[in-house]
Each structure stands twice: as C-alpha cells, then as structure tokens.
Amino acid sequence: MAKITQSVDLAARGRVAVLTVDNPPVNALSHHVRKGLHDGIKQATADGAVQAIVIVCAGRTFIAGADITEFGKPPSEQSLHSVLDLIEGAPKPVVSAIHGTALGGGLEVTLACHYRVGVKGARFGLPEVKLGILPGAGGTQRLPRVVGVEKGLQMMVSGDPIGADEALRVGLIDEIVDGDLATAGVAFAEKVLDEKRPLRKIRDLTDKIAAARSKPEIFAEFRKSVARQTRGFRAPESIVKAVEAAVSLPFDQGIKRERELFVELLNSPESKAQRYFFFAEREAAKIPDLPADTPAKEIKKAAVIGAGTMGGGIAMNFANAGIPVTVVEVAQEALDRGLGIVRKNYEATAARGRLTPADVETRMGLITGSVDFKAAADADIVIEAVFEEMPIKQEVFARLDAVCKGDAVLATNTSTLDVDEIASATKRPESVIGTHFFSPANVMRLLENVRGRKSSKTTIATAMAVGRRIGKVPVLVGVCYGFVGNRMLHQRGLQAEKLILEGAAPHQVDRVLTDFGFPMGPFAMSDLAGLDVGWRIRKGRGVKASVADRICELGRFGQKTGAGYFKYEKGDRTPIPDLEVEKVIVDVATSMGITRRAISDEEILQRLLYPMVNEGARILDEKIAIRPSDIDVIWVYGYGWPVYRGGPMFWADSIGLKALRDRLLEFKKQSGDAFWTPAPLLDRLASEGRGFIG
Ligand code: 3HC
Ligand code: NAI
C-alpha cells in the first residue's frame, strides 16, 4: 500500500489497482483528496502491471461532495475538473465501488468513471441545489446522459438521493454488490477486463438525451411542475438551463456553460445564505456545556399524555421512527377521537401513495391508547400535551412522578408556560424538560427543547437525541415566555395588527411577506391556526388585541369557520379579502383616533421583521438562545423563513446592523413608542460595525 497523500492510498490487488479515499468524517473532496486521486490515477495508469483501477472509500461513506468549507477560498491544486478529466480519459477501466452516500462532487467522481457498482444500502444524489448551487463538476452534463433528462432534472432540482435499486434501474450503477467493497469492486473490474468491455465514457453517450432534443417542451413542462416549490430560489432555474445546454450543446461547451452558471450561483446571496444554513443546522446540535459524548438514555418506549391536536401528531413521530408509544387520555371518547384522527392522517398519506396500507397498520400497531396513567409506567420518555393550563400540567406531572420509572425523561409540550414551575410538581425536576413541537407535529421539523433550570445533562442529551431520531431538528433554548420562536413571532404580530389599523390591508401585509419568501403571511397563518386559540390565551392573561378580539366576537375563528381575517370558499384554502373585516378594522381605528394612510411595502417589511431581529438580540443577551444561528434554524424550520435568506439574524447582518438599528430609532422617533428601542446587544454591535454572525 502506498500513500499518495494524507487521505488517499494506492494498493495493488493483482492486476487491479485500488485507490482508497480516507478523509473522515464524510470523505469530502478536500484539496488533498483531489490531489491524491489525481496523482493516484496517474501513477496507476503509468504502471504497466495495472490493467484496471477501482476507487473506494474508507469509513462510513463514499465521497459526500466537495469540501464546503473550501468554498469562497482561493482555488488550490488539483481542480476537481482536472481529476475527472484524468479519470474519464484513463486508458484503463476505472470503476467506483460505492457505499454510504455518493453525493455532489462524490457522485460526479463516479460519473467520470467508466463503471459504477454499489452496495444495497448506498444512496446516490446531487444535493447541490440545497446549498444554492448546481453540480459544478460535470453533473449537469453527465447525469442526464445516464439517467435521461427528466430523471436527471428531478434528481438535481429536488436534491434528494435515490437508493441502489432505483440507481440500478435507471442505469446510474451497473451492479449491486455485497461483501467487502474493495473485493467486490476488484471482482467487477476483473469481469470488465475478462469480458473486454469498452471504456464507457458518459460524455460520449447521447441516446438518453436524444429524445429531449426533439422535445424541447420537456423543459417548459418541468419548470411549470416545480414552480411552486422552487419559488424564490435561484439554483433550480440554473440547473434547468445547464441541462438544456447538455441537450443542445456538445459536451465540452455544455461543461463551459455549467461552469458559468456555477460561478454565478456560488457568488449569489442565496447560496451564501444556504451554505451558512447548512452549518448552522449542524451547529445547533452542539451544546457548549454538554460534551458530545454525554450519554443519552436509550428510548425503547414512549408515552404521550393527551390525544389532542398536538398529542396525536407527537405520537405519530414515534411510530414513524418505529418506537412503540402509548397515548394516555382522560376519557375513552377523547382517546378514540384522537387515535381516529391519527389513523385518518395515515390513511390520507397512503391515499397519496406515500405509505402502503401495510405501513399504516404497522404504524398504528405501534400506537396504543389508555385512560390509565399507569400505561406510562414503563416509558423511557413521556411527553405531556394536555391543555395549556398550569394547574392541569402540574397535576399531570405529579401523577407522572408517581407512576413513571425513576430514569424516565418527563417532557412538556407547553408553548407558553414556565417549564421550571411544571417541573416543581415532581420530585425529580432534573428529569423534566420542555419539548416544544410545532403544529402539525408530525410534519414540522422544528423541535425547541426547553432547558429547565434543573434539567440534567442526560435529560438534555436524551431530548436532543430522540428529537433527531424522530426526524426533527432540535434546538436547545431556555425558559422564557414564548421561548425563542413564538417570542419573536409575537413582536411581528403586534406590528401586523398596528399596520392594519394604520391603513394597510391584511392581504397587503400578507403579500409583503409571501413576496419575501414566507409560505404565508401572519393573517393567513392566524386563520389557519384558528383565532380562538390566541383569544382564549389573551383572555386568560387579561390582554387585548383590538382587531383580533372583534373578529373572534363575530364568530370568525379562521379557516375552520370559513372566515377569519379573510373569507374562504367551501373546500378551498385560498384567503379572500373581506369587506366585513375591513369595516371592523376601520371602526376600531376610528375609535382609537388613528388616521389611516397608505403604507409602503418597504415600511411593512421593516416593521414586521426588524422588531423580530431586535427581540432576537434580547434573546441572545438573556442567553435564551445559545447562538444567533440557532435562532435562524428555529425560524427556517418552524416558521417557513426562506432558507435562501438564511434566517432573521443572518438576514439582519446582510442589511447591516447599523442601518437596522438606525431605522428602529427612526420608527421610535416617529411613533414615540418605546417598543422601538434597540436592544443593547444590537446597539453595541451596530456601533462597533459588527454583525451577529462571526
Ligand atoms: N464538506 C465539508 N464538511 C462536510 C460536508 C462537506 N461536503 N458534508 C458534511 N460535512 C461535515 C458536517 O459539517 C459535519 O461536521 P461537524 O461534525 O463538525 O458538525 C460532519 O461533516 C458530519 O456531517 P453530518 O452531521 O451531516 O453527518 P450525517 O451522517 O448526518 O450526514 C451526509 C452525512 C449525508 C453526507 C451529510 O453530511 C450531507 O448531506 N453532506 C453534504 C452533502 C453535499 O451537500 N454535497 C454536495 C457538496 S457541493 C458539491 O459537491 C459541489 C460539486 O458539485 C462541485
Ligand atoms: P388540545 O386541546 O387539542 O388537546 C389536549 C388534549 O389533552 C385533549 O384531548 C384533552 O382531553 C387532553 N387532556 C386534558 N387533560 C388531560 C389529563 N389530565 N390527562 C390526559 N389528557 C388530558 O390541545 P393541543 O393544541 O394539542 O395542545 C396541547 C399542548 O400543546 C398545550 O400545552 C399547547 O400549548 C401545546 N402546543 C400547541 C400547539 C398548537 O398549535 N396547537 C403548538 C405547540 C404547542
């Protein structure tokens, strides 16, 4: 075995040379990997004893792509293109043998090889779109030549990987292998040699793209089919353009076009935000005072208390992950209703073809119901999702304390109550933590884990680990009213209400935010969630929201009653502006002595989002969030903040904190309202010319 570079080895197995990449954790194509592959291929092709070359990877995965940390730095030797040219142009067959994930530049390496084999569990994808870029090492030109234009477009624009069976079916790999990967790769290479198979260069294949040459409408149809989910993103359109080039231009010109589009995207604000977000999401898993090896409790069984809107969805998450879960309710009727809704949800998913009827039964089989708290006795984690009232929560926790095993994690899904106060109802506050799911709980990825004053490290580590296991993105936050997400949302809500009183229409406010990239605006969102929920909470806390209260008094609770801030046709969720609401708004404004005026979209955007950033700064100052990027993760996953704008804190930096702070001061001067006072952290960073991030 000869070391080519720190991360690439070359070894001979008879007449086959094996190049092994070993660059933990994910074998990213760092400069020493590129150089190792380059020099290794050169060495093997120059060696008369070598007749074929196999590329494999050590560790948990095949190459997972370019090294994202190198983006934006000066290019270093060798370029990935030069490595791929060398592989594809090699005079001896080059085979890649794949396990784990061959992603991005990793898949592009394999596409430059003459043959590809993979193990059954391997996955193949070009996820660059998720970083706001496109496959920039020939992927847009080679993939359609192997799998066809439509499949290629779909893989690159979704960024989602495919499994080995599908890869074999669409021609992306030549064989599924098992056993030791290098041995299997060598065996396949031997077969290529014995059968004298040609050096199959994907660049020369045309049969799969020929069809699209005579059917250019494929592209228009594809654009239309993805318009909704790609709205606001820049990369998907560039990918389509690059594939058009693959179809209409000779290979080398297509590569040139791909390069131009790649560079354009790499420098775009959208990609910078998305790359930032990639690391932000991973950073959120790290908790400064919790070493990475803090043991988390193994979760073999879960229990959920309450089978309402949230409880049912939370239980589904466990069943989806294969974890048995017991749902405890006060009465059989409520339990039956709750589990009935869970079944209906699964059946609806099956009707859309995303689950088989057998999957539905397997998952339902993992969920059991009970009206006896003792059913939670053997659960490793219990998540309480009963009514949002402190005495009820405390009573539930006291009962859990009495029945649950000593080392169980006791979690609350409260959205507004004090986790420490809930924990005080038990004799084991160290085992109590908040797990704040977002609605619908089986769909939304965000999980705000709320660390109580006494939550132990094991309790925290368990909540973070189980969150990931059930497919969520957990972010650890501290105790305060509304935690991070809703506390910031509240600031936006206050301004939204003021804006409509001062002259903006609810649909104008919503449009400004949907234009910004949110899936919906605050008023459509309130209508979807149900206006009565907030009304009840406000009544409980003795606070008023003039317009919202009046709308609720009219029996308009949102979509469920066919009317809220907007009206809705039966069976249709499209919000329609309603004169009745306008009248309420004008009445309330008049009674408050407000002179209504036309308000610009720019002012609306600033008044909605700048206070959120300001609140984010307070949240950081109070150490409720660990870091600014955690706030961004919360807003992207919990509230639909467009990822191509990074999140509120990243976005604030892109505007410049000084400009933002100064605008807050202007609003303060105009309104005389202390609401606009810049948070001390924002003020300090703005004065120092710094941003929140980095
Ligand atoms: N470059 C640099 N670092 C990377 C990386 C990459 N491509 N991919 C992952 N990492 C790092 C992560 O930041 C993380 O670091 P940390 O431990 O310090 O937080 C570590 O590797 C492990 O990553 P994950 O926590 O994500 O590990 P998982 O096992 O959950 O997932 C994975 C593995 C599926 C490979 C996932 O990491 C992933 O999706 N990576 C990105 C893949 C990608 O986007 N590739 C395309 C890159 S762009 C490209 O190739 C351009 C080309 O076309 C020219
Ligand atoms: P819900 O009213 O739909 O369901 C509550 C359920 O708890 C009811 O089925 C009720 O019968 C049951 N219940 C009440 N007391 C019980 C007891 N002592 N033992 C067992 N079951 C009991 O309420 P929802 O919306 O599911 O909310 C539950 C919790 O989740 C609340 O704390 C709420 O603040 C929180 N939450 C709600 C969100 C939402 O969008 N609905 C979002 C995030 C958190």
Image (spheres, helix red, strand yellow):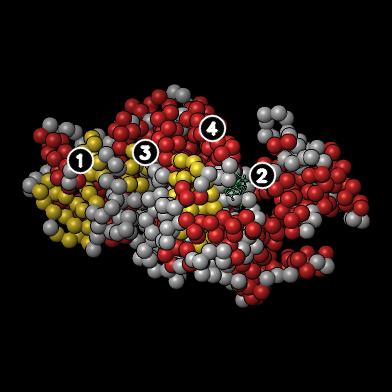
* Mark earlier in primary sequence (4, 3): 3
Q: Nearer the viewer, residue 137 or 542?
A: 542
| Residue 529, numbered label | 2
**Cα–Cα span, label 4 and label 1:** 40 Å
Name the residue tied to disc 3: 162
Q: Nearer the viewer, residue 57 or 460?
A: 460
**Cα–Cα span, label 2 and label 4:** 20 Å
Tell me the quadrant of the picture where the N terminus can be found.
Answer: bottom left
**Three-letter code, disc 4:** Lys
**Three-letter code, disc 2:** Ala
Rate crowding at label 3 as few (under 14), some (14 to 19) or many (20 or more) other CA atoms within 10 Å: some
Q: Nearer the viewer, residue 324 or 60?
A: 324
- Residue occupying the point 45% across, 36% down: 364
Give SS at disc 3.
strand
Residue 31 visible in the picture: yes
Rate crowding at label 2 as few (under 14), some (14 to 19) or many (20 or more) other CA atoms within 10 Å: some
Give SS at disc 1.
loop
**Three-letter code, disc 3:** Ile
| Residue 178, numbered label | 1
- Spot occupied by residue 444 in the image (x, y as percentages of width and height): 54, 47
Name the residue tied to disc 4: 344
Nearer the camera: disc 2 or disc 3: 2
**Cα–Cα span, label 1 and label 3:** 18 Å
